[in-house]
Image (spheres, rainbow, N blue to C red):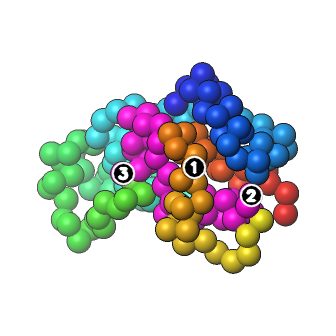
Amino acid sequence: MDKRVIKKGMEALVMIDEDVANAVEQVGYPAPRLRPVGFETMFAAILSQQISTDAARFIRERVIALMDDVSAKSLLKVDPEALRGFGLWSAEIYLMFSLRRRDVFPAGDLALRSSLGILKDLEGKLTPKQARELVEHWSPWRSVGSLFLWRYYRGAPN
């Protein structure tokens, strides 16, 4: 999503969610996160699933060392036990950042759920199902809302 799409989406979210409107005043709009379409981006998303970027970089380097080159064909040659599968979070991240889908909410993301709980002033940890229900009304701008929640997570008041 580019700046234009993010601006349009945030303007819509501010109109339909008072909590978002208040939070935007504190942290502003999220920055674009664009990634190229293709195997290498999908591969990176799979490896970084639910872990820090530093840990993902370390794992990516170790897996790439097992491959002839970064391609699907080369990955198929790697022992399956050396790799762990592809999850919903990876697919949603790829849809958002590479295919630029506007209505994706990766509810499996711990930071998103935590940020949403803070935004909505809720006690306890949200389940993915609860988080999805809380942002249903954000459609068709849930990807922009996700970007905003990641930004809010870094800058939200305690």
Residue in view at x 64 percent, y 50 percent: 150
- Residue 46's mark? none
**43 left or right, relative to 109:** left
- Residue 91's mark? 3
Q: In the picture shown, does residue 99 fall above or below 22?
A: above
- Mark 3: which amino acid? Ala
Instruction: Report helix, strand or loop for mark 2.
Output: helix
The quadrant of the rendering that contains the C terminus is: bottom right
Residue in view at x 76 percent, y 51 percent: 19
Report the residue marked by disc 2: 119
First of labels 2, 3 by sequence position: 3
Report the residue marked by disc 1: 137
Percent across and percent down for residue 97 are 46, 38
Asked whether the residues under the numbered discs 2 and 3 touch, taking CB atoms below 8 Å apart as contact, a structural biologist would say no
Residue numbers of the magenta segment: 91-120
Percent across and percent down for residue 95 are 39, 42
Q: In the picture shown, does residue 82 fall above or below 14?
A: below
Rounded to the nearest angstrom, the CA distance separating label 1 from label 2 is: 15 Å
